[in-house]
Amino acid sequence: MRRNFISRRVVQAGVVVLGVTLVAFGLQEVMPGDPVELLLQKEGLFHPTPEEIAVFRAQLGFDQPLPVRYVRWMQQVFRGDFGRSYVSRRPVIMEIRERLPATLLLSMVTLLFSLLVGLFGGVILAVYAGGVLDHLGRIFSFLLRSLPTFFLGTMLMVLFAERWRIFPTSGMGSWRHLVLPALVGGSGFSVVVMRLLRAHLLQALGSDYVLAARSRGLALVWVTLKRACANSFVTVLSLLGLYLGGIFGGAPIVETIFAWPGVGRLLITSISDRDFPVIQAFVLILGLAYVGFQALIDWFYFFLDPRVDSDGE
């Protein structure tokens, strides 16, 4: 069963990766603007003649059929070559490599914040279910989940940066620069973890083995942490795979709001400049991150509880 599970996941991941490469390559074909004319404009030739466009198109290989260009692009990608930025004229891999550490730092802090708040809040709401604390926590989580990211970011900046001057509004340099972006980026996932963990814990707390433990005089908090949480954490773990892949997906919004010098902000400027090689590289890396993180969580989830795949699911 384990061999079937691994082989099935490898095939599924391969199909998804192939689809991601097709989407990343096809962006240049569906996005508005001719990349050849854009490149000529970057070179200072704003009104090229059709002959000049045809010569430049042949030099870049854009006169070749689409399948041929896709195969050549894939060969470059396998060598770690994503081409050169139309704007900076530097290799795309260097542009991403310089900004990736900033995005990874912010992503890890955001993930840590989300898990701490979500797990702690879920346990508290389950232990005090039906009480005032539970009602306030559910209302607060509903409001937090309903707020758009840009609105929450703007509100926090006005309060904590402009009015009270506790945290800086933008940039990167100290731990204080991480607080507001991590709050905005991790608020949604922390609410999901909190509500999911609360629901599973309440279900677990009503099971026979927990009732038996409590009948022996064990405290509710101890029973919750020792017995019920162990089963509920497996469900939270399955969500973690989706969130890890989504870190890069949410990076453009958060990094733009707080002027964080990461790859997400690079993507936003690249879209406005029609810098297709950078956009293709970001989409491909984001897709591979999704597939990789989800595969790791699936395999870890399976080894924790092999019954999840006993019937092919």
Image (cartoon, rainbow, N blue to C red):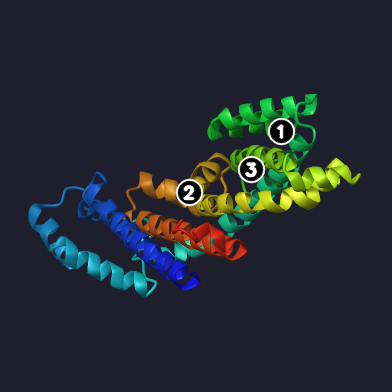
Q: CA distance from mark 1 to mark 3?
A: 25 Å
Q: Nearer the viewer, residue 182 or 52?
A: 182
Give x and y (percent) for residue 264.
49, 50
Q: Say left or right for 75 vs 307.
A: left
Above-or-below relation of 165 to 88? above
Above-or-below relation of 173 to 302? above
Q: Is residue 172 visible?
A: no
Q: Kindly identify which residue carries mark 1.
A: 160
Q: Kindly identify which residue carries mark 2.
A: 249
Mark 3, other Cα within 10 Å: few <14 / some 14–19 / many ≥20: many
Q: Nearer the viewer, mark 2 or mark 3?
A: 3
Q: Nearer the viewer, mark 1 or mark 2?
A: 2
Q: Say left or right for 52 vs 160.
A: left
Q: Kindly identify which residue carries mark 3.
A: 193
Residue type indicated by callout 3: Val
Point out the tag, 2 or 3, that comes first from the N-terminus. 3
Dividing the picture into quadrants, the one containing residue 102 is: bottom right
Dividing the picture into quadrants, the one containing residue 68 is: bottom left
**Point 89% across, 46% down: residue:** 216
Give x and y (percent) for residue 46.
21, 48
